[in-house]
Amino acid sequence: MAITIKPALRKNPQNKDAAAKYYAQVVLAPEMALKQIADRCTLTGSDIKAVLDALMTVIKRNLANGSPVRLGDLGSFRPSVSGKGLEDASKCGANSVKKARVIYVPSTEIKEAVAMYSFSKAGASAANEEGGDEKPDPKPGEGGGEAPDPAA
């Protein structure tokens, strides 16, 4: 199994006068649904929905209090801000915050799975595709093989 990509023409946001270039863009596959999780365990769809609703409540509350949230094999979330740079520390406060956001850091297990992704170009067969169906080599010189199915 591979992630399908297609070329997307994009301008350089830092140099508006530069010629646009093609960049690889993921062609999204069908979305995963809660039913797929329920089919892999003994919980019902409503049980899974209840757990996810509770998880969202706890994540939102903790992030709003400035606490990072660590979710084991899923990774962690932490609050972050960006704002105006000021020369005087005494003037740096809530007014200097422009934007709040959440940073997600995947677990080692997820990072390892991502490193094993393979790619194929949309509409191209593996036999005649140039530069496609290749995995990035995170550790040159070590074995290869099929990427494990993260859903398995």
Image (spheres, rainbow, N blue to C red):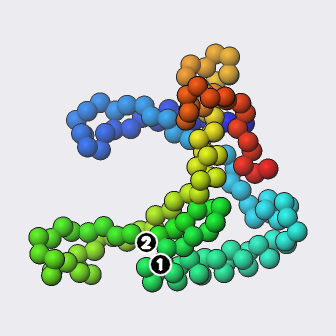
Q: Earlier in the sequence, mark 2 or mark 1?
A: 1
Q: Is residue 29 left or right of residue 36?
A: left
Of all residues, the one furthest to the right in this rendering is: 42
Residue 130, visible in the rendered structure: yes
Residue 122, visible in the rendered structure: no
The dot on residue 67 is 1
In the figure, 116 relative to 41: above or below? above
Q: Residue at x 51, y 81 (%)?
A: 62
Q: Residue at x 63, y 39 (%)?
A: 116
Q: Nearer the viewer, mark 2 or mark 1?
A: 1
Spot occupied by residue 102 in the image (x, y as percentages of width and height): 45, 68
Which image quadrant for residue 130? top right
Circles 2 and 1: CB distance less than 8 Å? yes
Which residue matches tag 2?
Answer: 79
> What is the secondary structure assignment of the residue under circle 2?
strand
The dot on residue 130 is none
Q: Indicate the quadrant containing the N terminus: top left, top right, bottom left or bottom right.
A: top right
Q: Nearer the viewer, residue 80 or 1?
A: 80
Spot occupied by residue 48 in the image (x, y as percentages of width and height): 76, 73
Spot occupied by residue 47 in the image (x, y as percentages of width and height): 80, 76
> What is the secondary structure assignment of the residue under circle 1?
loop
Q: Nearer the viewer, residue 136 or 6?
A: 136
Spot occupied by residue 105 in the image (x, y as percentages of width and height): 51, 59
Q: Residues within 10 Å of mark 2 (few under 14, many from 20)?
A: some
Q: Amino acid at mark 1?
A: Ser
Which image quadrant for residue 66? bottom left
Q: Amino acid at mark 2?
A: Pro
